[in-house]
Image (cartoon, helix red, strand yellow):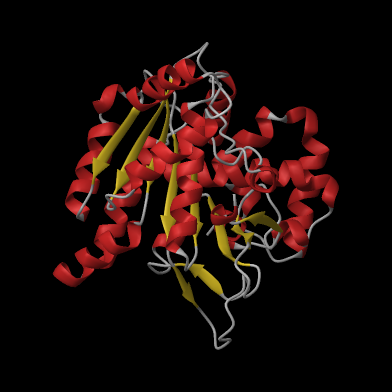
Amino acid sequence: MPPLASTTYIQQLAKANSGKAVLFNECLEALDKVGIRTDYDLLLQSDVLQQTPSKLHPHIRTMRWAVLEHFSSAGNTAADLLNAAAASPHIEIRCGIGPLDELLGSSVSGGKIVEICGKETGVKTWLSIEYATAHLTDKSHCQVKPTRVLMLLSSSLALWQVEKSLARRFKDRPKEEQMTLFRQAMERLIIVNCNDLDSLLSTLFHYANGGYESGQFSDLLVIDSIRPLVLNAIHQSNNGDVAIHAIKTALCEITDITRTSPPAVLITNGISRHGKNTQLDYHNVQPSLGSVWALVSHVHIYVYPKDEDTEYINATVLKSPDIVVGKTLTILNAGCW
């Protein structure tokens, strides 16, 4: 592969940021010292921010986002994509769980795919629903476009959990107002039962092609428990790479930042262990479904009990272009609220 500095889209990026040319060259030199010489290296090496000077981190993050968008958006230069992103304000979603919002910052936002992975299914679903109901009740985006949530689910319990979360968010409002707010929020919730991979892909491509009035709302797409759907497809066809590639293609179309109002996407997934270490910590876990899946999401968060007492849960960054890998914060388990 060609050196990072000689790729056309990185040169376009440097030209677009000509006022910061010195820092740009410093970034290339710092990356070269730690063995990052191609765009593929920059995409895959997760500890890049830990090995480079902190003053360069904002510029390295910009380069890394450019690489991500280059690989997912054929026909556009990095400069085109970044300029389009700057011209089109994208939604940013915070769930209201202080430590998690502090950890992720603006990662859950339009045009980005965030994946919450772990063994505890209930915790992952709870967190995805907290993001969903926070978005439904957020008025800050409504001046531009109304907020909306599409939940692509394989569990019938999710609707009850959504209703419970909304009720908690409105509990301090007058009783008459509670009912009105609850009804308004539920009217902007679309639940699609995806019991197999075909129904998931049909929904994703329908959305990508303008279905569900995409582009008319500030959308959050939640795909809960994706692992069983893909595993069932693998058992039927014995070709998991094709299934994962189809999902990746659909998600890349949906989150293309040159689209009008690209949605934020939140996925829950299991984990798999790599290496010989039997202890499940962030050093030796990765989202389930294998290496082909690893490039689908921009950000991976690993959630797990802090200790045997499950009152608290740790959330650790496994992959992110913006956040130092391994950064961990602790949150209170939903059952203790």
- In the image, taking residue 150 as reference, residue 298 lies left or right, namely right
Residue 30 location (% of width, % of height): 79, 56
Q: Compared to 217, does 296 lie above or below?
A: below
Residue 110 can be seen in this image: no
- Residue 188 figure quarter: top left
Q: Residue at x 60, y 34 (%)?
A: 12
Residue 296 location (% of width, % of height): 43, 53
Residue 114 location (% of width, % of height): 50, 48
- In the image, taking residue 301 as reference, residue 234 lies left or right, namely left
- The answer to which of 122 and 93 lies nearer the viewer is 122
Outermost residue, top side:
143
Q: Compared to 166, does 281 lie above or below?
A: below
Residue 323 can be seen in this image: yes
Q: Residue at x 46, y 28 (%)?
A: 136
- The answer to which of 35 and 87 lies nearer the viewer is 87
- Residue 65 figure quarter: top right
- In the image, taking residue 205 as reference, residue 296 lies left or right, namely right
Outermost residue, left side:
236
Residue 174 location (% of width, % of height): 53, 18
Outermost residue, front side:
175
- The answer to which of 141 and 16 lies nearer the viewer is 141
The number of numbered discs placed on residues in the rendered structure image is 0
Q: Residue at x 51, y 79 (%)?
A: 274
